[in-house]
Amino acid sequence: MESEYKNLEEFLYALRKEKDWSYDELAHKLDLDYVLPVTVKKWEKGLKYPELKEIYRLAEVYNTDPNKILYYKQLSLKAGMDSIHTQFIKWVSFLLNVSFITAKYICIGVLVLLVIFAFSFIHIQGERVKTEGTIVGKNYLCNFAKWA
């Protein structure tokens, strides 16, 4: 089967956008009580994959071959879309309601800030050791070895 999309997420998103449906509209059209708009969004973000019954309903609603949906689901699984770092980025994407790429940059930015903070903390601790007991803000020396 020729692959137009990289994974199930892209495929489901493209099908929904082609019909110009919202998450609510698709959830309603699927006519499955347990499929909520948030469920549809999770499918498109790759946080959850539709089960077989849901795949057949999606195929009916979109008037497409269920094997095509299964094929893209398999592509997603083969591509390792369930790795822990990818799942974390997908959850950030879902919770902040941003694209996967934006969520990825947010995660990288937070990681860089954490590394900077860690090195700053280590540097401050190193400076404190170099002063050999100087208490910051005071004009006297204190030998911490005496206190130990």
Image (cartoon, rainbow, N blue to C red):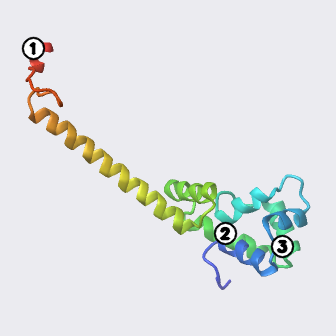
> Where's the N terminus, which quadrant?
bottom right
The residue that label 3 is drawn on is: 59
Q: How many marks?
A: 3
- Point out residue 125 in the picture as x, y percentages from the top left corner: 20, 36
Q: CA distance from mark 2 to mark 1?
A: 64 Å
Q: Earlier in the sequence, mark 3 or mark 2?
A: 2
Describe the element under mark 1 as helix, strand or loop: helix
Q: Is residue 134 left or right of residue 105?
A: left
Local crowd size for mark 3, using a 10 Å CA cut-off: few (<14), some (14–19), many (≥20): some
- Name the foreground residue: 89 vs 138: 138
Q: Earlier in the sequence, mark 1 or mark 3?
A: 3
Q: Residue at x 53, y 62 (%)?
A: 103
Q: Residue at x 66, y 74 (%)?
A: 10
Local crowd size for mark 1, using a 10 Å CA cut-off: few (<14), some (14–19), many (≥20): few
Q: Amino acid at mark 3?
A: Ala
Kindly identify which numbered label has been placed on residue 9.
Answer: 2
> Where's the C terminus, which quadrant?
top left
Q: Is residue 84 left or right of residue 130?
A: right
Q: Nearer the viewer, mark 2 or mark 1?
A: 1
Q: Residue at x 90, y 67 (%)?
A: 29
Describe the element under mark 3 as helix, strand or loop: helix
